[in-house]
Structures are given as C-alpha cells and as structure tokens.
Image (tube, rainbow, N blue to C red):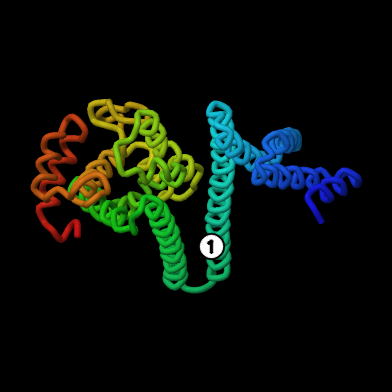
C-alpha cells in the first residue's frame, strides 16, 4: 500500500493521526524524489495538523524535514526558521521529560520515607509494653536504615548528574569529603559535618537540566551559553525543593548558593558575605579546589600548591576568608581529600 493509499484511507475514516503520519511520509517521499513543491505542500499540511492537535513530536518531525527541504533548495532563511522552531520544540520536550523524571524521583523518595515512618510508628506502638531499652534500639536501627537509604539515593543521583558532565562521580565524592572536613575544622558537630559531606555531593545536580551542547562543550562558552549554564543552581534547588528531611533541605541550600561569591559578584542572587549560608561557602571552596587540581577538557590539572595559592588569592573576593583559613589547614593533609 502506498502513502497516497494510506492518506486516502485516513481521510475516509476520519483518522487524524493516520492523516498526520501519511502526510509526513508523503513529504519525506517527495523530498527524496526531489519533488520540492509536492513535498513542501504535504509537510506544511502535516505541520498545520500537528500544531492544531498539539502533537509536538510530529510537529518536530515536520520542521526537521522542512529544514532539510529548504537546505536542499538553497533557501537558507526558511531552513534556519524551521531549525529554530525544531530546537524550541525539542527544548520543550526535554523540559517536560526532565520534569516528569524529577516528579517520579520525588514521589519515590517520599513514598519510601512515608513507608519507613509508618513502619517505625507501628514498631514503637507494638513495643510499648516491652523494655524501653530494646524499643529504643529498634527505633535507632530503623532510623539508621532510613539514613542509609537516603545516602544511597543521594549518591546515585549525584553520580547520575556527574555522568552527564562526562565524569564518573569521583568529583562529587571528593567535594563531599573535603566539605565535611572543612565543616569539622570550623567547629560543626560531627553529625552535621557528616550530613554536609553527603549533601555536598548534590551541589551540581542541576546540570541534569543543561543541554549537552553547553555542558560538554570543550571550548569557551558564549555569553548566552554561560548564562544558561548558571541556571543549574536554580534547577538543582528546584529538583531538591520541598524535601522534608534535613539532608535534602541542606542539599537544596548548597545547590542554590555554592556559586555565590563573598564579594557579591556570584550567582544566582548576588549574595555577599554572611548572606551566603555557610554550607554554600564551604562547598564553594571544596568545589573550586577539586576542579583546579583535576584535568578538564578545557585545562590541565593545577598542582596542589598552585590551587592553595589560588584559594589564598581569592580569600575575601570569591571565598569566605574563614573558610579559606580552614582549607589551608585541612588540605595540607593529603588524607583529608584523597
């Protein structure tokens, strides 16, 4: 059966999807046959139908084929128009899929939390008549399991985000380790410092929302690209927002503020000095130190001493001087950031 036959059948039975598919296929067929006018006519009809029925994928296919058609005919302006329309649709589809995945992850996390809280409540009720010491031990074990589950979810999410950046998760692990040690040096309680070390691993989770064309670019970013890259702080905070656990709340705070600068020239909100949460100030130092000492597509690795000197230079500008002072002490011991 030919595409013309398929179109005739779709029109006779009133199948909108069948008509749309048939016109797209006819457009591609005429393009391959170099029947430019027939191809253009069918593709424009398909595009109008796709827009009327809000069929985003078919609209994208129509724009893509029309772009090929106008390129073949040497009509640069029309080809560019359809290329830009295609890019807009792809961005909308990407954002919709990203939002769907984010909602699914949040729902999964909240369901697991609710299930464990319900289990803990049931156990506490059943054990009221038993020895208090045994009951408390059981609750502590369940709490530890929940903390371990949270840690595993955070670790997997951090590694997933870093894979998009072309690495394997070691950067987030090192940033978490350095951040925890800096917090200890600054007098944080041990439990809170450990929590910071876990939450810090999600500092760049928002990069999952940055297109590969920008995220994986080896050369210098254009100003518009850099502006879009900066939105990873807002995207990360959105992904982590609404969490009820202390871990996710701390991770949200870090994702949003780790690119703020002590002198107020950072992003996204140009916070300055103590306006920046100490968690963000700590992770900023850990993140920059590790980035400087690692090989990246756009630079060679700096030596340990060169990186420390950069921290000294940026104290009071990029970084909180108190955090830099702690870093110069902590990072002198290679075991604290291996």
Residue 118 or 39: which is nearer the viewer?
A: 39
Q: Please tell me which residue is depicted at 34% across the width and 52% down the height of the picture.
A: 201
Q: 242 above or below 146? A: above
Residue 128 or 266: which is nearer the viewer?
A: 266
In the picture, residue 191 is in which quadrant?
bottom left
Question: Residue 79 location in percent, x, y?
Answer: 56, 32
Secondary structure type for disc 1: helix
Across the whole image, how many numbered discs are drawn on residues?
Answer: 1
Horizontal arrangement in the rendering, residue 266 relative to residue 310 (left or right) = right
Question: Residue 105 location in percent, x, y?
Answer: 53, 53
Screen quadrant of the N terminus: bottom right
Screen quadrant of the C terminus: bottom left
Question: Residue 37 location in percent, x, y?
Answer: 70, 33
Q: Please tell me which residue is depicted at 27% across the width and 51% down the height of the picture.
A: 175
The answer to whether residue 327 shows anywhere in this view is yes
In the picture, residue 118 is in which quadrant?
bottom right
Q: Which residue is mark 1?
A: 116
The answer to whether residue 54 shows anywhere in this view is no
Q: Please tell me which residue is depicted at 11% across the width and 38% down the height of the picture.
A: 312
Q: Farthest residue in the right direction?
A: 12
In the picture, residue 177 is in which quadrant?
bottom left
Q: Please tell me which residue is depicted at 56% across the width and 56% down the height of the picture.
A: 108
């Amino acid at each position: 059966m030919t595409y013309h036959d398929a179109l005739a059948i779709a029109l006779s039975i009133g199948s909108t999807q069948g008509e749309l598919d048939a016109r797209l296929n006819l457009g591609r067929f005429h393009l391959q046959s170099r029947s430019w006018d027939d191809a253009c006519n069918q593709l424009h009809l398909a595009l109008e139908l796709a827009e009327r029925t809000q069929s985003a994928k078919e609209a994208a296919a129509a724009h893509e084929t029309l772009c090929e058609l106008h390129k073949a005919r040497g009509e640069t302006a029309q080809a560019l128009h359809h290329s830009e329309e295609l890019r807009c649709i792809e961005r909308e589809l990407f954002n919709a899929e990203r939002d769907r995945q984010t909602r699914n992850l949040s729902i999964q996390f909240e369901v697991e939390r609710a299930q464990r809280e319900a289990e803990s409540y049931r156990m506490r009720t059943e054990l009221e008549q038993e020895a208090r010491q045994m009951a408390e031990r059981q609750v502590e074990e369940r709490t530890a399991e929940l903390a371990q589950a949270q840690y595993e979810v955070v670790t997997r999410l951090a590694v997933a985000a870093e894979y998009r950046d072309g690495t394997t998760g070691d950067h987030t692990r090192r940033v978490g380790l350095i951040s925890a040690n800096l917090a200890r040096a600054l007098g944080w309680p041990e439990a809170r410092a450990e929590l910071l070390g876990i939450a810090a691993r999600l500092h760049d989770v928002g990069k999952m929302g940055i297109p590969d064309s920008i995220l994986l670019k080896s050369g210098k970013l254009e100003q518009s690209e850099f502006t879009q890259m900066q939105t990873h702080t807002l995207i990360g905070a959105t992904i982590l927002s609404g969490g009820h656990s202390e871990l996710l709340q701390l991770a949200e705070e870090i994702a949003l503020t780790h690119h703020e600068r002590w002198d107020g020239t950072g992003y996204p909100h140009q916070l300055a000095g103590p306006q920046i949460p100490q968690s963000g100030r700590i992770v900023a130092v850990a993140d920059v130190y590790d980035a400087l000492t690692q090989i990246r597509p756009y630079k060679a690795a700096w030596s340990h001493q060169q990186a420390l000197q950069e921290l000294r230079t940026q104290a009071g500008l990029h970084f909180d001087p108190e955090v830099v002072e702690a870093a110069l002490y902590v990072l002198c011991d290679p075991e604290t950031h291996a």
